[in-house]
Image (cartoon, helix red, strand yellow):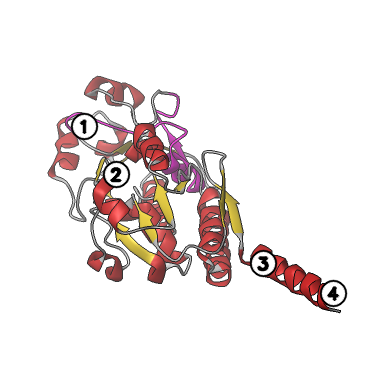
Amino acid sequence: MRTLLAALFLLHAAAAAAAAAVSAVDDAGRRIELPEPADRIVSLAPHATEILYAAGAGDHVVGAVSYSDWPPAARDLPRVGSYDAVDYERILGLDPDLVVAWRSGNGEETVERLRKLGLTVFVSEPRSLEAIPETVERLGRLAGTPEPARTTAARFRSERDHLAERYSGQPSVSVFFQIWNHPMITVNGEHLISRVIDLCGGRNVFAGLDPLVPRVGTEAVIAADPEVIIAAGRGRERPQWLDDWQQWPSITAVARDNLFNVDPDVIHRASPRILTGAARVCQALETARGRRP
């Protein structure tokens, strides 16, 4: 009887341990396994911070990099440096169960160093609109908040589908998306912002360039002759350099006054809020369609 009871106890303990263990595959293709849901999480990118909160894991986030300012509660998190210069000592001091990194922002060297320090790292690199709700669900699973994560993911997919149904079949609009002016930076077809343009029935005039955020010159923009120019600078205000395009009235976007600004926080970050930015891009393209002769 004692042997049977002991066996049953061990079986129950093993089942409980298995039930508590969580795992997910990150955007680098690595399987992340935790013996139990992460209770202490450090985020190394603003978009990752937003995704964690959206997944219902905000109470488990104990540190974040600068510019992690959404939702408002994230502004009070201890800072662990910036996305491109993390403070390893501060991260270790927070004793995280999980670190969420951004490979193209933090860099591969930073990710590897964190792993060598014994930390479990989930790499977040959403490159499509479909990847965002998937990341919400995966991080919700790792944080032990699968239900709120699934709710957020379902809402995102519904809103994305609504935008696609309304705009993606509309007549195509050629778009130059300008991230910055000096140097002049845009996005190629693999960038998430280009996927937003596609969703809205637009065509990124520099989709075929390399790398992900290529530099272009004024002459290239004039030659591409976009029907719309969209700028997203550093703040919500319309950047002065957007109106500098008025010097080239031969560009269709200038001739038709199709120069638009989008808040970078809702278009640059690969988080659920990108649909807010997408809606603004779609509205800009719809305005441009209405201005056609």
User: Going 49% across and 40% down the picture, which residue do you hit?
Assistant: 172
SS of the residue under disc 2: loop
Q: Which residues are magenta?
A: 181-208
Magenta region includes residue 130: no
Residue identifier under label 4:
4
- Residue 209 placed where, x, y %? 41, 23
Q: Which mark is residue 19?
A: 3
Check disc 3 and report its element: helix, strand or loop: helix
Q: CA distance from mark 1 to mark 4?
A: 86 Å
Q: Is residue 238 above or below residue 62?
A: above
Three-letter amino acid code at the position of disc 2: Asn
Tell me the mark number nearer the camera, choosing from 2 and 3.
3
- The quarter of the picture where residue 233 lies is top left
Q: Earlier in the sequence, mark 3 or mark 1?
A: 3
Classify mark 1: helix, strand or loop. Answer: loop
The label nearer to you, 3 versus 4, is 4
From the viewer's perspective, is 53 left or right of 85?
right
Relative image position of residue 283 (x, y in whole percent):
39, 55
* Residue behind mark 1: 249
Q: Is residue 67 left or right of residue 167?
A: left
**Mark 2 highlights which residue?**
258
Where does the C terminus fall, quadrant-wise? top left
Residue at point 24% right, 22% down?
217
Residue 281 or 128: which is nearer the viewer? 128
| Separation of marks 3 and 1 at Cα, in angstroms | 64 Å
Counting from the top left corner in percent of width and height, residue 165 is at 58, 56
